[in-house]
Image (cartoon, rainbow, N blue to C red):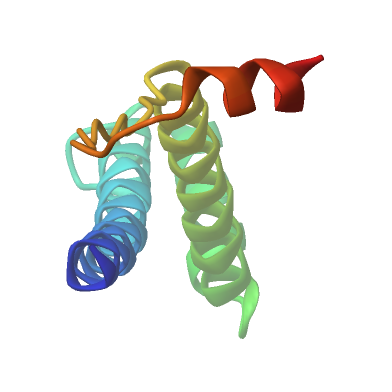
């Protein structure tokens, strides 16, 4: 029973690490779509100014990337924890004991 618990705990930890990686990858992909060569940069003068303000300023792009990574990772974690809580299952153990019971003593005990 304990080994089953430890196995589930290890799988849960691995799942959370994979969620963080997925969140970071998704955040960086969204930022790539927003600032890529085929989106707002080609939209006109306002797109180029926004792109230059975000990418060419030291530390701004890094801060935007980390904030998007953190936000998406936290949202994914919250969703996964909510799904886990909704699907919480209970382990039920059944154990049969084949022993003799003195019914008189049991009745005295229960009363």
Q: Is residue 5 above or below residue 105?
A: below
Point 23% across, 68% down: residue: 14
Q: Hey, which quadrant is residue 63 in on the image?
A: bottom right
The total number of labels drawn is: 0
The image position of residue 18, as x and y in percent, is: 23, 61
Toward the right, the furthest residue is: 111
Is 108 on the left or on the right of 66, as rendered?
Answer: right
The image position of residue 3, as x and y in percent, is: 19, 73
Q: Is residue 100 above or below residue 20?
A: above
**Front position in the image: 110 or 59:** 110
Toward the bottom, the furthest residue is: 58
Point 25% across, 53% down: residue: 22
Point 56% across, 58% down: residue: 70
Q: Is residue 48 above or below residue 82?
A: below
Is 24 on the left or on the right of 18, as rendered?
Answer: right
Is 75 on the left or on the right of 93, as rendered?
Answer: right
Is 46 on the left or on the right of 102, as rendered?
Answer: right
**Front position in the image: 58 or 13:** 13
Point 32% across, 56% down: residue: 28
In the picture, the quarter occupied by the C terminus is top right
The image position of residue 8, as x and y in percent, is: 24, 59
In the picture, the quarter occupied by the N terminus is bottom left
The image position of residue 108, as x and y in percent, is: 74, 21
Q: Hey, which quadrant is residue 30 in on the image?
A: top left
């Amino acid at each position: 029973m304990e080994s089953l618990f430890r196995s589930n705990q290890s799988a849960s930890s691995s799942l959370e690490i994979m969620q963080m990686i997925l969140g970071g990858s998704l955040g960086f992909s969204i930022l790539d779509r927003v600032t890529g060569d085929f989106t707002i940069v080609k939209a006109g003068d306002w797109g180029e100014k926004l792109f230059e303000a975000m990418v060419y300023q030291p530390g701004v792009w890094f801060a935007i990337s980390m904030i998007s990574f953190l936000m998406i990772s936290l949202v994914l974690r919250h969703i996964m924890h909510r799904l886990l809580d909704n699907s919480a299952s209970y382990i039920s153990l059944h154990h049969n004991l084949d022993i003799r019971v003195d019914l008189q003593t049991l009745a005295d005990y229960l009363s």
